[in-house]
Structure formats: structure tokens, C-alpha cells
């Protein structure tokens, strides 16, 4: 997929992601912009105000963003060095921060700070990430078994999916 050029400013977009009522845009130089509904802080701006136009997520400007994913009311992003950040609605622990308070600015998911995250995806009320060592982690609402841990429990911190390790080892 090629980058889309913005004629007005010659900005190239390398990735887009959509949440329930918000959109995310990563530029080729690693800046993250978000637009839409902001009630739970899912846009990542200090003030929780809706944005009709995409606005830069200043908290990640220096770190840069490699990829982003939007959930129902939350957002996660990965930096080029593999650091994982999350923000927005957190009732079921879908941010992976060990608590259930909403967060309106990008906050590092310290439970996987020793890993380099290469892929991340948000679901309705959960999140899944892949690390460069092949580990697969999930957290958030597990009511229907969507976390892959063999139960229906909520996880407020990323938990490695052990069964995936066994399946991958079988090759």
C-alpha cells in the first residue's frame, strides 16, 4: 500500500486506522493525527474535545509512531523502537495499564516495556499485540473467550497467550 499525498502540505500518510467514532492517521515521518469523537480520551489530546479535523497527537510527536489501531473507544500506537502506548476508555482494562480508569493521553504499556511490539490490533473492548520474539499478548474484556487464554476473565495487564506458543512450536 503506497502512501497517500496531501496536496496542500505534501504530507504523506502511511497508515490509517478507524475506531468506533474516531480515525487515526500516521504520516510517513511518524506523526500521529486523530479526528472524531473524544468523550473517553481516545483521540489522545489533553482536552477531551471532539475534533472535526485531524489534529496532531502532541504527546507522541518526539517519539514518532510506526503503527496505530483504533478500538471501540480506545486507541493504541507503537513507536519505531517497539514501545506500546494506549489511551481512551478503559473500563475492561483494554489499555493494559493495570487499572480501569480512562486515560486521555498516550501512556506507555509498561507490562510489555521489555518487549519490542511489532503488531497491535484493538477489538471492541480488548487489545492484542505481537512482540518481535513471537509472543502474542492480549488484555481487556474476555467475556466470550476473545483473549485466547481459555477462560472468560478480564485482564487488566497484557498476558501472553500460552496456547499460541505451543501451536507455533509445532510449526
Image (tube, grey):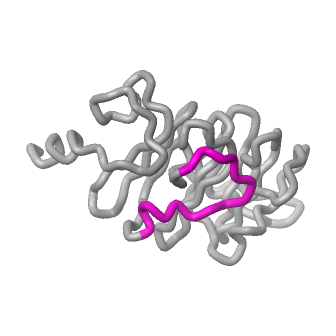
In magenta segment, residue 164: no
- Residue drawn at x 49%, y 65% is 110
In magenta segment, residue 101: yes
Q: x, y (%) of residue 87?
A: 66, 52
The image quarter containing residue 61 is bottom right
Q: Closest to the observer: 2 or 145? A: 145
Relative vertical location of residue 78 with respect to residue 24 in this rendering, above or below: below
Q: x, y (%) of residue 39?
A: 81, 40
Q: x, y (%) of residue 13?
A: 69, 57
Locate residue 18 relative to residue 170 in the image: left or right: right
- Residue drawn at x 62%, y 62% is 107
Locate residue 171 relative to residue 54 in the image: left or right: left
Is residue 48 shown to the viewer in this render?
yes
Q: Which residues are magenta?
A: 99-113
Q: Closest to the observer: 96 or 171? A: 96
Which residue of the protein is positioned furthest toward the left in this rendering?
170
Relative vertical location of residue 112 with respect to residue 24 in this rendering, above or below: below
Q: x, y (%) of residue 95?
A: 56, 48
- Residue drawn at x 85%, y 66% is 9
Is residue 17 shown to the viewer in this render?
no
- Residue drawn at x 32%, y 34% is 148
Q: Closest to the observer: 13 or 20? A: 20
Relative vertical location of residue 17 with respect to residue 46 in this rendering, above or below: above
The image quarter containing residue 59 is bottom right
Amino acid at each position: 500500500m503506497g502512501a497517500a499525498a496531501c496536496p496542500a502540505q505534501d504530507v504523506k500518510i502511511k497508515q490509517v486506522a478507524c475506531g468506533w467514532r474516531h480515525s487515526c492517521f500516521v504520516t510517513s515521518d511518524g506523526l500521529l493525527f486523530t479526528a472524531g469523537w473524544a468523550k473517553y480520551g481516545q483521540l489522545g489530546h489533553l482536552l477531551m474535545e471532539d475534533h472535526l479535523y485531524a489534529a496532531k497527537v502532541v504527546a507522541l510527536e518526539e517519539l514518532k509512531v510506526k503503527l496505530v489501531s483504533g478500538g471501540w473507544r480506545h486507541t493504541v500506537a507503537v513507536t519505531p523502537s517497539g514501545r506500546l502506548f494506549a489511551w481512551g476508555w478503559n473500563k475492561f482494562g483494554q489499555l493494559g495499564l493495570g487499572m480501569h480508569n480512562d486515560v486521555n493521553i498516550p501512556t506507555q504499556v509498561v507490562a510489555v516495556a521489555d518487549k519490542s511490539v511489532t503488531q497491535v490490533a484493538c477489538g471492541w473492548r480488548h487489545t492484542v499485540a505481537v512482540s518481535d520474539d513471537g509472543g502474542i499478548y492480549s488484555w481487556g474484556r474476555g467475556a466470550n473467550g476473545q483473549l485466547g487464554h481459555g477462560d472468560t476473565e478480564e485482564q487488566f495487564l497484557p498476558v501472553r497467550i500460552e496456547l499460541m506458543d505451543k501451536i507455533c512450536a509445532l510449526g
